[in-house]
Every structure is written in structure tokens, then in C-alpha cells.
Image: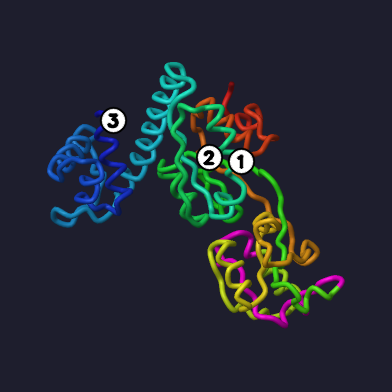
Amino acid sequence: MNLQQLRYLNEIVRRGLNISDAAAALYTSQPGISKQVKLLEEELGIEIFVRNGKRIVALTEPGKTILDIAQRILHESDNLKQVGQEFQAQDSGNLILAATHTQARYVLPPVVKQFIKRYPKVKLGLHQGNPTQIAEQVLNREADIAIATESLMLYEGLVTLPCYDWHHCVVVPPKHPLLEIKKLTLAKLAEYPIITYDFAFSGRSKIDQAFASADIEPNIALTAIDADVIKTYVELGLGVGILAELAFIPERDRHLRKIEASHLFKANTTRIAIRKNEYLRGYTYDFIELFAPHLTRDAVAKAMHINL
């Protein structure tokens, strides 16, 4: 038994039991993978996969247990490599961030700037996607950290830590009738076409919950995955926008006006997510603390059940 065999097993499952896709992903041959899996089965004395002819169709019951153990072994193997890298080169390496557009566009830039200044030898990567996509990227080891508001807590393989709370605001063109109202209401807001986030993004569920609780049906005229698109269409006069307050920058958004709406929609919490039982490089702890100062190394390590 060797780690390569375990990697083959894991990749076959990751690729939907398609050996050809697994071989392509690992830059090897299909016969080579098949041979190694058979050798592993012979050594263990059980069948890991259910086969229909030459085609793999499912994991056997013992195969599921073996996969779980194999994934833990591979995970710890990666941790060992991280430990070696930590002590060989403490200020260099790679850090891949996965974030939603709002985080990448409006929150991360000053943090990234500080981090690069502190760790110029660390290669930083930034992936954007919806909360589900970025959570899966971290679980699949395609990214090290996920940052989003929605969905991250739904994944058992992730440790999620609260970073900060934020509210939605309403944006309208200058001289819009809503600007004359002293305190905006949901009923008044619902009189106009609304442009806001797609359901998976930036606290959209809190918007829907507010209208549902008030038994009001909003006219959602257009949805988008990022605030810049929402603001563009509001500027065109196609409706009023509901977006994350942190995405409205007065000096940049001079053609729009912001209306306070924290009394209409519940607060949202942006969270950071990392894989459970992961060995984190020192600079990863520092990045997390730069992003959320209360998430010190001790606090993160305690949440991950790691003894410093």
C-alpha cells in the first residue's frame, strides 16, 4: 500500500467514478490507475468498487470506509508537507483565497495590500465565485481560505469563524421620490421595481425574509451576482437597488444616493472558512488576523482544535 494508490482512489471518487477523468487529472494513464487500484484491493483482501464489466459504478460498503481513511491519510500527508515548508521557508509559499465578489472588490484590497507588504515572497491567488463554489474549492484543496456571507456554515468539513457584521442599504438615483421619506418602509420600497442580489449572494436571504415576514410581495425586477452590476442598472433608472452597505462608496458612486435600511433588514455576518484539522502556515494565521483582528492565532487554533 502506498500514498499514490490512495490518491488514485480519492481522485476516482472525486471525478464521479470516471477513471479516464481521474487519469487525466493526475497526468497518468487509465490502465495504470486501474492496475494500482486492483493491487490495493488484493492487498486489503476486499473489493473497494462495485463493477459492471470494466466500468466502476459505485463504492462498496467497505470501500466507503477505506475512502474515508484514505482521505484522512492524504490530508495528514499534506499537513506533514506544510510543517516542512513552514520551517524551511517561514516567509514564502502560496496562499489561495476564494471569495465572493463583494468581499474581493470592497473588503479584501486593503488587507491584501498589507499582507503583500508583510510577505512579499508569498504568492497570493484570488478566486471568485458564489458561496457554494468557494466552499467546495476549499474542501477540494483548490483554495486555502473561503470568505463569504452565505452558506459556509452548511459544510461539515469546514471550520467557519465570524468576521464582521454588516447591513444592506437602498440606493437610488438623485431626486428619487424615496429620498423625501424620513424613514423608509418595506411597503414603500415595494412600490418600485427592485434590483438586488441573486439568491446565493450577499445576504439575499435576509432581504427575502424581511418581505415575507411583513407579508409583502416585492417586485424583484432584476438580480445580479455583484453590487457593481446592481448600481449600474439603478443609474439607468430601471429600479431601486438593495445592496451591501459596504459596497456603496460615496466618492465613487456620485450618481447615486444611499438610503439607510438597517431597520428593514437583519444584520448579516461575513465568515471565513478553513478546512478542519488543517495545518496552517504562520502567514495564513496572519492573513486571517489582518482580515478580522479579533481572530488571533490563538482564537483560530482553538476553533480548529490545534494545540500550539
Sequence-earlier tag: 2 or 1: 1
**Which image quadrant for residue 240?**
bottom right
Residue 266 in the image: state x and y as whole percent.
74, 61
**Residue at the spot x=66%, y=34% of the render?**
295
Quarter of the image that includes the N terminus? top left
Q: From the viewer's side, name the closer residue of 82 and 202.
A: 202
Image point (38%, 28%), residue name: 77
Kindly report the distance in space between the C-alpha atoms of the residues bearing marks 3 and 2: 24 Å
User: Left of 49 or right of it: where is 238?
Assistant: right
Q: Quadrant of residue 33?
A: top left
User: Residue 20: x, y in percent?
Assistant: 19, 50
Return the residue nearer the eye: 260 or 34.
Answer: 260
Residue 204 colored in magenta in the image: yes
The residue stretch that appears in magenta: 182-205
Q: Which residue is mark 1?
A: 110
Foreground label between 3 and 2 = 2
What's the amino acid at mark 1?
A: Pro
